[in-house]
Amino acid sequence: MEFSEFEAVQYCFPSSNSSCPKEVRPTAVYVVMYISAAAVVMLTVCGNLLVIISISHFKQLHTPTNLLLLSLAVADLLVGVIVMPFQLIILIESCWYFGHLFCTIYNLVKSVPTCVSVNNVALIAIDRYIAVSDPLLYSTKITVKRACSIILFNWVFSLLYMLALLYFSGNFTSADGLNSCLGDCMFLINEVWVIIDLLAEFIIPCSVMIVLYINIFVVVKRHVKILSCLTDQNNSKISSTSERKAAKTLGVLVFVFLLCLVPYYICSLVAANVSTSSSSVLINFLTFFLYLNSTVNPMIYALLYPWFQKSLKLMITFEICSPGSSLRIVHIECN
């Protein structure tokens, strides 16, 4: 009897004949899902907020590279605060309860920080490549002012790009498309824009990352080989360890980026030609999986930096509130 009770068909809006069906789960499952959802949101918000406070507070960290990290953290924070809660409600309740107008606004709001975040990952790869391949001229090529201009351009471009994608795909004009049934909120994207988005927000950034990080690894390996010839055996072992650590870090960066983005874009290509309820559920899940990149980013791009660990210690001990704390040295080598 219990099994049949949970399998009974329910609807998002029982009083409406056009309501979407609602997936029914046991109460215990709902509790576990909401607790897990709250933990993911808190982890995303807190992780990125710590990065923002660290880079904003300590003047030593006001460098071009860290400004890119700051932009990335702000975008990921917006994902955690604005986007993830609603996406998790859709996953758990399998219904959209917030109306057509907010559905349109939500589709725009959730897309812009995600676009900014992906572009920031590629920009960080470009920044690191220039720093490694041409360290003597890096400070003249990449200045704080130039980094701020690039960051501003990235945010403006992402906003305009997503407005164009949503408009030309009918998200602002087709209420029936956005809500195939009452309780649904679809992100419309036509076949042409699927290809454009695949190129602009996946293939190009991903290719930039992979190519540049491979080149970074080659340059670092060459530097290590030169240093090993000029130094003693102990320093050679240290260099070898550093090389392996760098290779491991680069591997993690590329792997997580691909892991979060590949499933979503493959499914988007399929869903553009096949529209079923099961594909809608899968898209919602993979969209959330894409947002998990915002949860992992502060761990990869910040927790691996020694300055973040020092900043975190100063925040935990409230030394960050002391006068002149913004002038503290939190890292010996800071580009």
Image: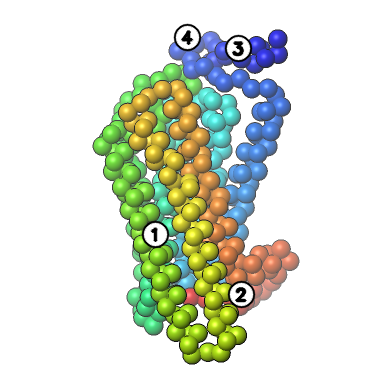
Q: How far apart are marks 3 and 2 (CA)?
A: 59 Å
Question: Looking at the rendered structure, which numbered label has been put on residue 210?
Answer: 1
First of labels 2, 4 by sequence position: 4
Residue occupying the point 37% across, 78% down: 134
Amino acid under disc 2 = Val
194 displayed left or right of 314: left
**Displayed quadrant of residue 238:** bottom right
Distance, label 1 to label 3, CA atoms, is 48 Å
Picture quarter with the N terminus:
top right
Question: Label 3 to label 4, Cα distance in Å?
Answer: 17 Å
Q: Of label 1 and label 2, which has the lower sequence position?
A: 1
Image point (54%, 25%), residue name: 94
Eye-nearest disc, 1 or 4: 1
User: x, y (%) of residue 157?
Assistant: 33, 52
Separation of residues labelled 1 and 4 (CA atoms): 50 Å
Please state which of residues 196 and 50 is positioned toward the viewer in this rendering.
Answer: 196
Contact check, label 1 and label 4, Cβ < 8 Å: no
Mark with earlier residue (1, 4)? 4
User: Measured along the vertical axis of the image, is residue 40 above or below residue 20?
Assistant: below
Residue at the far right: name it. Answer: 317
